Image (cartoon, rainbow, N blue to C red):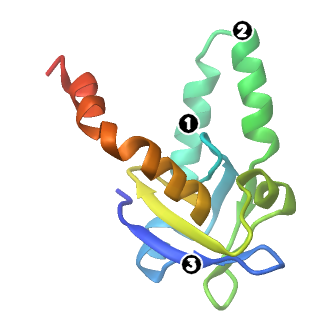
């Protein structure tokens, strides 16, 4: 399970250091793709296979096709360089508006990469509603 928040930077070539604490859990071959809410998702290879298998079980609807096109067209396999960095392709850098300061967060089965500005906006927008969000999610327990 991934968790925590890490502040890092991305360079002009799209290279981003993955914290050493997360590298072992992520493994050698992993997938980076467009995420939701303007961030990137990073999945370990096994989790990626599980997700794709779940999507294959969905009915072939217009929404499924549209989602899969966007989700998979941005997906790329990544590996670490000798400094523990990954190279994020230009279209994904643009999608997530990554320019210098980045936030990497652990979200259970995946990592998310956010621009610092977008992350702070997300937190500011949702932090005051956290209690209401929790009440809605756990109302049935």
Q: Quadrant of the C terminus?
A: top left
Q: Position of residue 107 (x, y in %)?
A: 41, 52
Q: Secondary structure at mark 1?
A: helix
Q: Residue furthest bottom?
A: 83
- Identify the image quadrant of residue 52: top right
Q: Which numbered disc, 1 or 2, marks the residue that appears first in the sequence? A: 1
Q: Which numbered disc, 2 or 3, marks the residue that appears first in the sequence? A: 3
Q: Quadrant of the N terminus?
A: bottom left
Q: Residue furthest left?
A: 141
Whether residue 21 sits left or right of residue 72 in the image: it is: left
Task: Name the residue tied to disc 2.
Answer: 61
Task: Name the residue tied to disc 1.
Answer: 51
Q: Which numbered disc, 3 or 1, marks the residue that appears first in the sequence? A: 3
Task: Name the residue tied to disc 3.
Answer: 8
- Between circles 2 and 3, the one closer to the viewer is 3
Q: Position of residue 42 (x, y in %)?
A: 59, 56
Marks 2 & 3, CB-CB < 8 Å contact: no
Q: Secondary structure at mark 3?
A: strand
Structural crowding at the residue carrying mark 3, measured as other residues with C-alpha within 10 Å and reported as few (<14), some (14–19) or many (≥20): some
Q: Is residue 115 visible?
A: no
Q: Give the residue drawn at x 58%, y 46%.
A: 48
Give the Cα separation between the discs numbered 2 and 3: 39 Å
């Amino acid at each position: 399970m991934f968790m925590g928040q890490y502040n890092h930077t991305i360079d002009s070539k799209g290279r981003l250091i993955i914290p050493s604490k997360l590298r072992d859990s992520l493994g050698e071959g992993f997938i980076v793709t467009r995420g939701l809410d303007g961030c990137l998702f990073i999945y370990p290879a096994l989790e990626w296979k599980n997700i794709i298998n779940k999507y294959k079980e969905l009915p072939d609807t217009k929404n499924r096709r549209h989602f899969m096109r966007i989700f998979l067209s941005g997906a790329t396999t990544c590996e670490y360089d000798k400094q523990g960095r990954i190279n994020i392709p230009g279209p994904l850098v643009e999608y997530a508006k990554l320019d210098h300061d980045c936030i990497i967060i652990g979200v259970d089965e995946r990592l998310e990469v956010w621009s610092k500005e977008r992350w702070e906006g997300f937190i500011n927008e949702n932090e005051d509603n956290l209690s209401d969000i929790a009440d809605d999610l756990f109302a049935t327990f």
